[in-house]
Image: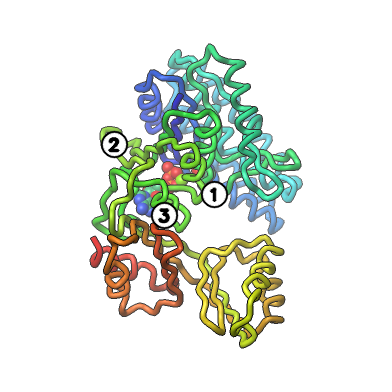
Amino acid sequence: MIVLKFGGTSVGSAENIKKATTIVNSYSSSKIIVLSAVSGTTNTLTEVNKLLADSKKSNAIDLINALELNYHQLIKELFSSKKYQLEALLFIQTKFEELRLYTDASYQNEKIILAQGEIISTHLFQIYQNELGNTSLLISALDFMSIDIYKEANTKSIKNKLTSILSDNNHIKTFITQGYICTNHKDEIDNLKRGGSDYSASLIGAAIEAKEIQIWTDIDGIHNNDPRFVENTFSINEMSFDEAAELAYFGAKILHPQSIIPAQKNNIPVLLKNTFNPNDIGTIIKNCAPSSGVRAVAAKDKIIAIKIKSYRMLMAYGFLKKIFEVFEKYQTSIDMITTSEIAVSLTIDHPKYLDNITQELKTFGKVEVDKQMSIVCLAGNFSQSGKGISASVINCLKNIPIRMISYGGSNYNMSLLIASEDKVKALNLLNDGLF
Ligand code: ADP
Ligand code: ASP
Ligand code: MG
């Protein structure tokens, strides 16, 4: 069995849904199709939630109504027969009535509202398959995809529930399900965070021990640098799990930060392909020897750096443990860390508990906070053979102030913390100097 995940743009219009369908039908093996919401929908639903939080209900309803009209257009273009067009329109009507009702108690319904994007795209996709006469079964991700109290995926439960759904329907070869959405430990509707459909696909692939996980998107695989900020980037045909995991975690938007781990743990190759250029070979991520040198550069924004300076740290043991305990208490993960004899600097990407954290850290020493920072991550193989790479990296960035450097944590990553205003310049300098 294989998993095929289509991102927002790949199901973003009638024309693109048709392209995705052609791709799906080119695979004769059994498959699970994982869909994102139609592009723009999750952004709009996020906006709806913001308006509701600001008590601007009528503006929220205006947005919902405008979104509904987009779906009417999509349906008109997608379906050729009146019968299926009507079925799709009725479905959309019911869904949008529900959405308007959810606006009554915004806070309880935030996650339910966000979930509608994927619920809509998968239903429309399935109605379209029915129109084409393709047999498929729509299975709700809410029946098997779940996270625990720490927001970690319940991998065992996902496996048990999904395999049982599949074996109950073993005459079906094509399953369709939602990316992104899940239930949480209270059995409420929740999600895997923005861009989470990649993670859904990987979790599903791991659960069913898929032969391959395919991520179909709007670009021909992983590029050596962020194409949104750098010209002349090129796609990388093959990448190791370790390199891809570092890149995804440290900001390459093409992959959700956690999406490589389930595939890697189960040794399932992940193939990234372009829905709009399916003949391009894309990028295969698999268990292969990482080639030497820098493979790719990515950047992660909205980073906060915290420096704790204390002479009590000098020669003392247990100091770092006490600091880490503060972050643990506030469930805030640390991305980068560097230490000197009298200070430790670390970064977080979650400002929610920043005030509580800094208050508590002040009991250890002087605390300085820098906001609007970016981590520039270089993924590649920096082991023995990589002599001189770090020197070239620093040389490329010689005119950019570097706040922290992290190197040697793994053989596959080098991270530098810089001010976000220098990010685009840094990505371009690295592109010119390293590739
Ligand atoms: P999808 O909706 O299919 O999930 P995303 O928008 O989440 O697609 O991810 C694809 C986008 O990621 C590309 O259009 C590209 O702009 C951006 N991107 C950022 N970094 C990279 C990279 N290193 N390689 C390829 N694409 C990247
Ligand atoms: N629709 C969700 C988002 O836009 C999940 C995804 O596309 O992967 O973030
Ligand atoms: Mg994405």
- Give 160 or 76, whichever is nearer the viewer: 160
Name the amino acid, label 3: Leu
Q: Position of residue 233 (x, y in %)?
A: 27, 55
Q: Mark 1 sits on what residue?
A: 194
Q: Is mark 3 within 8 Å of ligand 1?
A: yes
Report if residue 100 is visible in the image: no
Residue occupying image coordinates x 28% and y 60%: 385
Q: Is residue 39 left or right of residue 294?
A: right
Q: CA distance from mark 3 to mark 2?
A: 23 Å
- Give 295 or 3, whichever is nearer the viewer: 295
Q: Is residue 428 above or below residue 206?
A: below
Q: Secondary structure at mark 3?
A: helix
User: Which of disc 2 and disc 3 is earlier in sequence?
Assistant: 3
Residue occupying image coordinates x 26% and y 51%: 234
Q: Mark 2 sits on what residue?
A: 277
Q: Secondary structure at mark 1?
A: loop
Q: Position of residue 287 (x, y in %)?
A: 38, 41
Name the amino acid, label 2: Asn
User: Which of disc 1 and disc 2 is earlier in sequence?
Assistant: 1
Disc number for residue 370: none
Q: Mark 3 sits on what residue?
A: 247
Q: CA distance from mark 2 to mark 1?
A: 25 Å
User: Which of disc 1 and disc 3 is earlier in sequence?
Assistant: 1
